[in-house]
Amino acid sequence: MVLTDTADKIKSMEIRGAGRIARAAALALSEHAGSIESTDIASFSNEMKRAADLIAGTRPTAVSLPNAVNIVMASMAQATTVAEAKMAIGSKAFEFVQSSKNAVERIGKIGARNIRDGDVVLTHCNSEAALACLIEARRSGKDFTVFATEVRPRNQGLLTIRVLNEAGIKTNFIVDSAVRSFINEIDLVITGADAITVNGAVVNKIGTSQIALAAHEARTNFIVAAETYKFAPRTILGEQVEIEERPASEVLPDEMAKNLPYVTVRNPVFDVTPAEYVDLIITESGAIPPQMAYIIIRDYLGWDISEFGKEFDIDHHD
Ligand code: RUB
């Protein structure tokens, strides 16, 4: 079953990275819609709501996931028959996947302009959007060097160095704790994002905020490459982005942990970088300062402050 299979793959991180997760979720919903046999629109939409909740609940931090689910689910709002609903969901999911891929490509083009010949660029984790900027800069003939971190405990840095190597980009691979030792050699830091809040804070792989702090201290530019569907509309309502904490066994093997009864492993896998440490956010709609995050949420995701009213049933008086 595609839905549960995709949900399991997202949970186990076989499918990972905020953009890939969002695209996989959209496609899984579309395939699930196609597999529903009922011709009753009410039971069809109940089943789709169950599917949407299941897939949206697989990982809590990447806001691209609920955003993709909401975009796909909203497409069936006007459908009066199951056939119409299936058609709407299928074409919206396809459109989302296409626009997501186009967004990454566009971000690459915009982001590459920030990389100069001879630069030394540091990246953390494995972000398609950040890598798109590096690959496009290389493709356009720029000669630069990258530092890529290891990314404990899941070693996403190994994925990154393979991609960089394939693109013929000279890369130094370092352990996460070596960042500050090298920061004075770095001209630019570029990372991806799992979520961007209304106040421009960037939620990304654990360790990102330490890197941003080191970059800030060294006056090194720190830029973030993120599609507009990574912006978190519900932060307008004061909601926090939940930081996922994954199993202790990712950090310390169970057989070692069981002999250390006083030791508790903590494994938060994302952290929050405040807007003050972010110089620029590259989206497919252009490069913006983090302080403009609200504009993206309002103009590109269609969420306005007036949503407050709807959410809390507040009467608006003119
Ligand atoms: C991945 C991660 C990436 C963002 C952006 O974490 O933090 O930097 O998701 O990636 P995980 P992309 O490996 O835990 O999913 O630009 O590919 O969407």
Image (cartoon, rainbow, N blue to C red):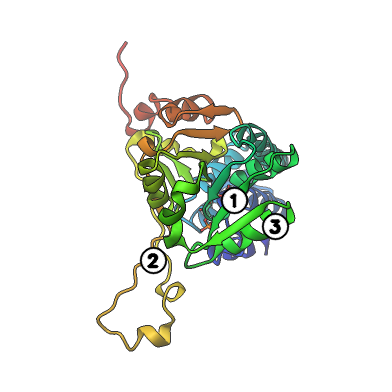
How crowded pointer 1 is (Cα within 10 Å; few <14, some 14-19, many 20+) is rated as: many
Q: Give me the residue at 45% from left, 49% from top.
A: 183
Query: Which numbered circle lies on residue 146?
Result: 1
Q: Is residue 158 visible?
A: yes
Q: Give me the residue at 58% from left, 58% from top.
A: 172
Disc 3 to disc 2: CB gap under 8 Å: no
- SS type, badge 2: loop
Amino acid type shown at disc 1: Val
Disc 3 to disc 1: CB gap under 8 Å: no
- Would residue 286 be found to the left or right of residue 263 on screen? right
Residue under circle 2? Answer: 267
Image x and y of residue 78, in percent: 62, 32
Residue under circle 3? Answer: 165
How crowded pointer 2 is (Cα within 10 Å; few <14, some 14-19, many 20+) is rated as: some
Mark nearer the viewer, 3 or 2: 3
Disc 2 to disc 1: CB gap under 8 Å: no
